[in-house]
Image (cartoon, grey):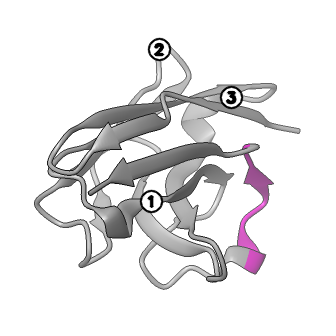
Amino acid sequence: QVQLVESGGGLVQAGGSLRLSCAASGRTFSNYAMGWFRQAPGKEREFVAAINQSGGMIWCADSVKGRFTISRDNAKNSVYLQMNSLNAEDTAVYYCAADTRLITTGTMTSRINYWGQGTQVTVSS
């Protein structure tokens, strides 16, 4: 089992920034590809960004390219999502995800093995 705990969400004004963190425990972190997904009220959970096990490959949704950056620190068993230039459409619960298989823009949420509990991000306009 892998336990994932997100932090860093909150309320921010449009144009502002937040940095989400996800701390993993339970298994060898470097064996897992990591991703961030989000779910807005009334909408399905959607892919945001992902990073492979070594950190050498990254995928981002078109809606966040140039604004969000995913990174990981295998020594700290953590993955991060730096979010800049936030707008109201970014308001959602953000979930950390882990899987031994690569997570990419086309990965279905039903295929993900491990999820965090989510952290709320609210952008006020």
Q: Position of residue 33 (x, y in %)?
A: 54, 51
Quarter-of-image position of residue 84: top left
Q: How far apart, in angstroms, are the residues tagged by discs 1 and 3?
A: 32 Å
Name which residue type carries label 3. Answer: Thr
Residue at label 2? Answer: 75
Residue at image coords 68%, 28%:
28
Q: Which mark is residue 25?
A: none
Q: Is residue 34 above or below residue 47?
A: above
Q: Nearer the viewer, residue 26 or 125?
A: 125
Q: Are marks 2 and 3 in contact (CB under 8 Å)?
A: no
Where residue 124 appears, as percent x and y from the top left, is: 34, 51
Q: Is residue 38 visible?
A: yes
- Tell me the quarter of the picture where residue 93 sits: bottom right
Question: Looking at the image, which residue sits at the far left?
Answer: 66
- Residue placed most toward the observer, 70 or 32: 70
Residue 37 falls within the magenta-colored stretch: no
Determine the residue positioned at 32% across, 35% down: 18
Of the image marks 2 and 3, the number of the one nearer the N terminus: 3
Q: Is residue 53 above or below residue 110?
A: above
Bounds of the magenta segment: 110-116
Amino acid of disc 2? Ala
Q: Quote the CA–CA distance across marks 1 and 2.
A: 30 Å
Between discs 1 and 3, the one toward the N terminus: 3
The residue labelled by disc 1 is: 91
Secondary structure beneath disc 1? loop
Q: Is residue 112 magenta?
A: yes
Instruction: Identify which residue is drawn at 21% across, 51% down.
Output: 14
Q: Amino acid at mark 1?
A: Thr
Q: Is residue 123 left or right of residue 38?
A: left
